[in-house]
Amino acid sequence: MSEAVPQEENSLEIKRQEYQDFLTDFGLLISLNAVHLDKYALPGHEEEIREMLRGFRGAFINGKSFNDFTFENDPAVLRRPDVARALLEQIRLHLVYMEPRISFLDPESGFVKRYSAVRERYTALVNPSGP
């Protein structure tokens, strides 16, 4: 049986491995999957995509980028309820920010497909019983 990330009262219980895998997937989305994102921008939307890329590299939590923060902290720290809650909220805000900008990209790009998969995983993680 998979160990759960400890949660406070009135909060969601998340399986530890699912949470860690999700953090990895999100990190890959905004780093490796976004490396050549500007090549997939539809004509007239290049600047919006460049701005989105700058946001991926910017401060995410505690003045650090997502990848710097998750790399510099021990997994036990990332599983603390207050940290997990903050990370998931920041991820939600980034996914909401990306949503309208996805239409500025070639729909066949790997980023668009990966974004959809990460968004679905986020929804399943925070709402395991469905909508």
Image (cartoon, rainbow, N blue to C red):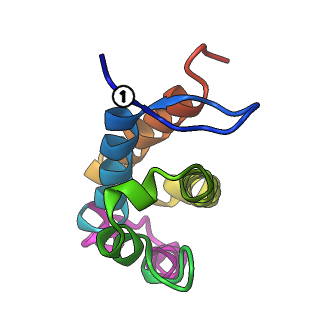
- The correct choice, above or below, for 113 with respect to 105 in the image is above
- Tell me the residue that label 1 is attached to: 3
Which residue does the image show at 51% across and 53% down from the upper left?
80
Quarter holding the C terminus is: top right
- The correct choice, above or below, for 47 with respect to 7 in the image is below
Q: Nearer the viewer, residue 10 or 70?
A: 10
- Count of all numbered marks drawn on residues in the image: 1
Q: Position of residue 120 (x, y in %)?
A: 47, 32
Q: Position of residue 13 (x, y in %)?
A: 56, 28
Quarter holding the N terminus is: top left
Which residue does the image show at 61% across and 25% down from the upper left?
127
Query: Which residue is the extreme one toward the right?
Result: 10
- The correct choice, above or below, for 32 with respect to 15 in the image is below
Q: Quadrant of residue 11?
A: top right
Which residue does the image show at 43% across and 64% down from the upper left?
42
Q: Amino acid at mark 1?
A: Glu
Magenta residues (range) = 33-56
Q: Is residue 64 visible?
A: yes
What predominant SS class does the magenta segment belong to? helix
Q: Nearer the viewer, residue 100 or 130?
A: 130
Q: Is residue 107 visible?
A: no
